[in-house]
Amino acid sequence: MGGDLSLRSGAGTDSVNIANFSTVRGKVSLDLGAGGSSTTVNTATIGGALTLTSTDGDDTLNVVGGSLVGGKVTVNTGAGTSSASVNGSRVLGSMAVTAPGGGSLLIASAAYVRGDVGVTYEAGDNSAVIDSSVVGGAFSLKSGAGSDSVTIANYATVRGSVSLDLAAGGSNTAVDNATVSGALTLTATDGVDTLSVAGGSLVGGKVTVNTGAGTSSASVNGSRVLGSLAVTAPGGGNLLIAAEARVQ
């Protein structure tokens, strides 16, 4: 297809598939209304940006199978949950996910996102995983009340900073056998929050943990932090630096 692709729909469940070596040389714009949707880009190429917008329902976007998106990927959904993934594929722009109903993000299987990855959730139990993949810019996650899980693992690299604003409800953040080239910041307001840097990981800047009324657990285990380490936990907690870890 030589130009752009756009789809606008009303209430109801929508399905969009771009697959099997298909090419859209321009941008793809999907305005899918309410009712939930499933969008898949599988072994395909989009020359420009990919934008998914909806108002209500559970929405899924998967870029898989060695696909290529030449511009920014934007997901902006409504009250339902949102699931977005880049799996074994490349995005040559940034990635922005806004999902007031909460959801999950997966960047995995040697995926590559050239720019920043920014995620905003307002409710629910949310997760973000960067596994054996590269984010070329910064990674940020902001969430509301609920239990949150963030994992950067298995030789994953974030070439910028990592900023996590996880609000209330407790959280578990793990950097395991991975690289964060910039600073790593975790902020929360209530609940039990855990940050672990382990498995030979490297953080290139300062590690900051600032939590609320619950307990806080922070550890650097067999890993390196090339900046300082600052932990503020009004609810108390524990700190572990072990197994030949180094905080510079």
Image (tube, helix red, strand yellow):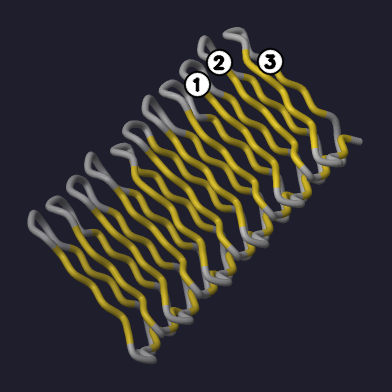
Q: Position of residue 55 (x, y in %)?
A: 21, 46
Real-space Cα separation, disc 2 to disc 3, in angstroms: 10 Å
> Which is in the foreground here, disc 2 or disc 3?
2
Real-space Cα separation, disc 3 to disc 1, in angstroms: 13 Å
Crowdedness near tag 2: few (<14), some (14–19) or many (≥20) residues, C-alpha within 10 Å: some
- Identify the secondary structure beneath mark 3: strand
As drawn, the label of residue 138 is none
Q: Quadrant of the C terminus?
A: top right
Q: Residue furthest front?
A: 243
Which residue is tagged 3? 232
Q: Quadrant of residue 187?
A: top right
User: Of residues 215 and 110, which is closer to you in this image?
Assistant: 215
The amino acid type, in three-letter code, at marker 1 is Val
The amino acid type, in three-letter code, at marker 2 is Thr
The amino acid type, in three-letter code, at marker 3 is Thr
N-terminal of the two: label 2 or label 1?
1
Position above or below: 182 against 159: above
Which residue is tagged 2? 215
Residue drawn 72% across the image and 55% down it: 159
As drawn, the label of residue 192 is 1
Q: Quadrant of residue 217?
A: top right
Q: Give left or right: position of 175 versus 10.
A: right
Crowdedness near tag 3: few (<14), some (14–19) or many (≥20) residues, C-alpha within 10 Å: some
Crowdedness near tag 1: few (<14), some (14–19) or many (≥20) residues, C-alpha within 10 Å: many
Position above or below: 64 against 244: below
Residue drawn 37% across the image and 80% down it: 42
Q: Position of residue 231 (x, y in %)?
A: 72, 20
User: Of residues 227 and 71, which is closer to you in this image?
Assistant: 227
